[in-house]
């Protein structure tokens, strides 16, 4: 009881401390980074103490089970946060979530929808941590079911690359079965280079169109292509999560790495002087301004590259520092995260985005924030 009370006092003290750093938080202050992540995470854990609680969004008049992609992304972030600040309560919170859903997926093991499979990333993490493969049996069965067919066009939107692709890499690493690596490439390459006759990856800009609806001739109001920041952030995060731990001898390792490097250099020219990326990267007049999720995912990806000696620190440290200061400015004294664009597929969705605006789902924004902060901490 005393420990809980002391933690509560610590959070109160931090809440009063936050306004003192209004000009940003240094990426060199590890203690402040952890406390900021802890504050945001405790806000969410206190609000969602029941991990199985149905997610109801009044504005949509609709409910979802708590193992959909939005919540799964949160747990990705929580597991990353636990690596830099290990706490039994974080692992127990994730374990309770998995057990509440019997380690299953929305729509069951025959689902091919990457959004439904996203929960499997944390199931696999926990299976390895607890040395209990039963936690990952359903996600493995789902991916194995996909391998029984020749279908490779499931990832028809770029968000799906982050939700599903890292699972193939992890299963390949764990089992040593080359089939996971082969199918991962086939699906990625189809989305990248072949979907709708040309693929969703723009080889000139090294950025991605969200889905076929945004491929040329579609243009933003200023006449530029539509590169949605969070969508591109999902791809960047996916490449990081695939490359992290992937053996260099794996087929197409160099292809993934090249796409990752090209993307990281490409996004630099679109970063606003305020540290953020506009929701429409090439059109700052189209719902421009601070936005947390895309910025956090880019920060995560850039920091990982620097930490692993892939990106040059002298080139990327300043953009990372500016981005982290901006992300920090989104944190309310109670831990709520502002400037989060809610669910959608393009710049105009879930607007307006602002410091005091509550998005339709709060979980995935926090997941992105935890991923970013946990990697920035390692710099």
Image (spheres, rainbow, N blue to C red):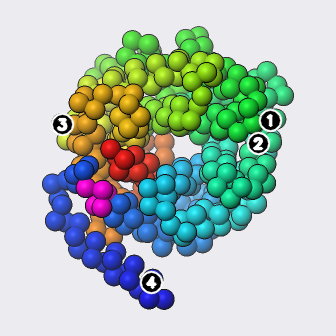
Give the percent coordinates (x, y) of residue 204: 39, 12
Q: Secondary structure at mark 3?
A: loop
Say what secondary structure mark 1 lies in. Answer: helix
| Circle on res. 3 | 4
What's the mark number on residue 292?
Answer: none
User: How far apart are labels 4 and 3 at the CA level?
Assistant: 42 Å
Q: Residue at x 53, y 26 (%)?
A: 211
Q: Which segment did they paint magenta?
A: 29-33
Disc assigned to residue 144: 1
Is residue 200 at all visible to an observer of this figure?
A: no
Measure the alpha-carbon separation of dots 2 and 3.
44 Å
Callout in the foreground (1, 3):
1
Location of the C terminus by quadrant is: top left
Image position, residue 29 (x, y; %)? 25, 55
Please name the residue that numbered disc 3 is placed on. Answer: 273
- The answer for how far apart the CA atoms under marks 1 and 2 are is 6 Å
Mark in front: 2 vs 3: 2
Reading the image, the residue beneath label 2 is 140
| Residue contact at pointers 4 and 1, CB within 8 angstroms | no
Bin the neighbour count of mark 4 within 10 Å (Cα to Cα): few under 14, some 14-19, many 20 and up. few
Instruction: Name which residue lies at 58% across and 52% down.
Output: 72
């Amino acid at each position: 009881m005393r420990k809980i009370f002391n933690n509560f006092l610590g959070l109160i003290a931090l809440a009063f401390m936050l306004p003192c750093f209004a000009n940003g938080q240094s990426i060199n202050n590890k203690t402040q980074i952890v406390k900021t992540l802890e504050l945001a995470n405790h806000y969410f854990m206190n609000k969602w103490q029941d991990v199985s609680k149905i997610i109801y969004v009044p504005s949509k008049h609709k409910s979802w089970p708590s193992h959909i992609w939005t919540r799964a992304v949160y747990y990705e972030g929580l597991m990353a946060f636990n690596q830099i600040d290990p706490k039994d309560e974080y692992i127990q919170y994730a374990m309770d979530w998995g057990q509440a859903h019997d380690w299953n997926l929305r729509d069951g093991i025959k689902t091919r929808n990457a959004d439904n499979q996203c929960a499997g990333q944390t199931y696999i993490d926990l299976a390895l941590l607890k040395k209990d493969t039963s936690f990952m049996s359903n996600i493995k069965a789902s991916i194995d079911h996909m391998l029984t067919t020749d279908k490779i066009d499931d990832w028809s939107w770029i968000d799906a690359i982050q939700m599903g692709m890292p699972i193939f890499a992890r299963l390949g690493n764990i089992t040593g079965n080359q089939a996971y690596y082969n199918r991962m490439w086939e699906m990625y390459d189809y989305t990248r280079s072949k979907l709708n006759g040309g693929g969703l990856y723009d080889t000139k800009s090294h950025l991605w169109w969200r889905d076929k609806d945004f491929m040329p001739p579609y243009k933003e109001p200023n006449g530029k292509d539509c590169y949605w920041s969070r969508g591109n952030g999902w791809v960047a995060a996916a490449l990081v999560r695939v490359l992290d731990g992937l053996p260099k001898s794996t087929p197409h390792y160099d292809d993934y790495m090249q796409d990752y490097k090209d993307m990281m250099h490409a996004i630099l020219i679109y970063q606003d002087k305020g540290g953020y990326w506009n929701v429409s990267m090439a059109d700052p007049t189209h719902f421009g301004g601070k936005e947390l999720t895309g910025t956090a995912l880019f920060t995560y990806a850039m920091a990982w590259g620097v930490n692993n000696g892939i990106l040059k620190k002298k080139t990327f440290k300043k953009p990372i520092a500016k981005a982290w200061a901006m992300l920090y400015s989104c944190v309310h004294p109670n831990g709520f995260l502002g400037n989060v664009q809610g669910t959608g597929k393009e710049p105009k969705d879930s607007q307006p985005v602002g410091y005091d605006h509550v998005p339709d789902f709060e979980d995935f924004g926090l997941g992105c924030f935890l991923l970013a902060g946990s990697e920035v901490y390692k710099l």
